[in-house]
Amino acid sequence: MSLEIMDKMRKRADLCAKLVNESENVHIISHNDADGITSAAIAKTALGRRGIEHDVSFVRQIDEATIKSLCSDKSKLYLFTDLGSTVADYIVDSGIDAVICDHHVLSGRSENIEEKSKTLPGHLNPHIFGANGSYEISGSGTTYLLARALEEIPGQNKDLAAIAIVGAIGDMQNRKYRKLVSMNRIILEEGVEEGVLSYALDLSLFGKQTRPVYKILQYTSDPYIPGLTGNEEGCINFLQKLSVGYSRNDGAKLWIELSDEEKQKIVSGLMGYCLNLNFKTHKLESLVQECYTLVNEKPGSELRDASEYATLLNSTGRYDKAEIGMAVCIGNREEALKHARTLLSEHRKNLVNGLNFVKDSGITQMENIQYFYSGTEIKDTIVGIIASMSSSLEGTDRKKPIIGLANSEDGIKVSARGTQELIRRGLNLSTAMSEVSDIVGGTGGGHDIAAGATIPEDSLQTFLTLLDEYIGEQMSA
Ligand SMILES: [Mn+2]
């Protein structure tokens, strides 16, 4: 199935490449998250190798106003990456030359988004061909297909598969099957063939390249492990009992410093620990999953691990420095990498401060939801992450989703976070956010497990009451 669709995708990519090749000057417009940053880096590299002049802009979201302000030069071709498919109509109506490499769900008039689209021929999106953009291919993957189609020397852009996979992991395309599948997998295999990627089953927890093992355990929130999550002493004791990863003489070790045997010892120890806590099978299994390594990056560098790399890129975009992340992707390992690491460490500081705010001010319990309201104490760009991290705090109820609220320029930013467990019981935060925010005059949406909304400031109490009822109904159905 996916092979046939991949074929159609490649054909469409050829058409896109033709349009790009015919233009003398390309303006890349990309999303400012890890998927968008890697997309822009892939497009930039491919255009550079082809000798096509170009520049790049990053945006937080795309709408009519953004297109009006960014796309005024009729002599340019506008290449939209990791965004654009939701505004296909505006793009056509604005009369600009455009190519779109995106994976978001399409909206607009059918003549712009169907397989035989005449009005917007350079529109590459898996949904056009019946594939799902949430796990079959990411924005960076579609841009990678364009890059392959732009090759002058066959195979010259295959190396870009490495950052294409970083983008896919940044968008959590591996979540559904706990590994990359479909077109993502084809791209992965191309990267393996090219010698830039490898994959293997490994501990699924975050920080294997850069964190001491006890910190990896301490910071894990998915799954939440009672006695270890948020408990430094508990994690050190756990490792000392196993006599691996932490000792008084040798100190703390990084995950990558351990031998295979030592790693196995920790994984088995962890499984046993969780089994004693009556973890269900799927939760136990989630401790180990396929992990992706950029084999040409230095061991101990966050760039070696696709998920740590994506986190680094996200922190640049989150603080309006996506171009720094892109510079890292295209190989600047001096200034740009240093700058990106500074942004990441400031980001972590902001997270610690945010989490402390929630700890001090507490989480308010309602019947079916729990929430914190931070006013301006937590930036609206990180309130979602704080909501996820709050699950490890004392006083949080694991049986309810967490709602984080922060003031933003356009009202109150709402970020809702659930767990797989709650989804199995009927929770769908995507519909909850879009429908309830709609009632109070806001907008919202997202995924079943994580969603967001922006609502008018004076509707806060009404919104919370309605949301509490709505989610109660979801989980009792
Ligand atoms: Mn994306």
Image (spheres, grey):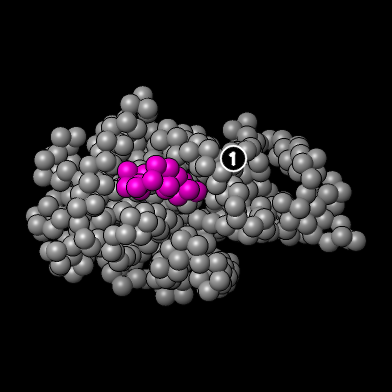
Label 1 sits on what residue type? Tyr
Towards the viewer: 421 or 155: 155
Instruction: Tell me which residue sits at (31%, 65%) in the image.
Output: 56
* Label 1: element kind: strand
The answer to whether residue 425 is left or right of residue 131 is right
Instruction: Tell me which residue sits at (10%, 59%) in the image.
Output: 94
Residue 73, image x and y in percent? 15, 67
Q: Quadrant of the C terminus?
A: top left
For label 1, the residue is 199
Instruction: Tell me which residue sits at (55%, 67%) in the image.
Output: 333
Q: What is the tally of numbered marks visible in this picture?
A: 1
The residue at the far top in this view is: 1
The residue at the far right in this view is: 249
Towards the viewer: 378 or 110: 110
| Residue 386 sits above or below residue 305 on the image | below
Give the extent of the magenta segment.
146-162
Residue 458 colored magenta? no
Residue 30, image x and y in percent? 32, 59
Q: Quadrant of residue 31?
A: bottom left
The answer to whether residue 356 is left or right of residue 216 is left
**Within 10 angstroms of label 1, few (less than 14), some, or many (20 or more) residues?**
some
Instruction: Tell me which residue sits at (43%, 47%) in the image.
Output: 156
The answer to whether residue 456 is left or right of residue 336 is left
Residue 156 colored magenta? yes
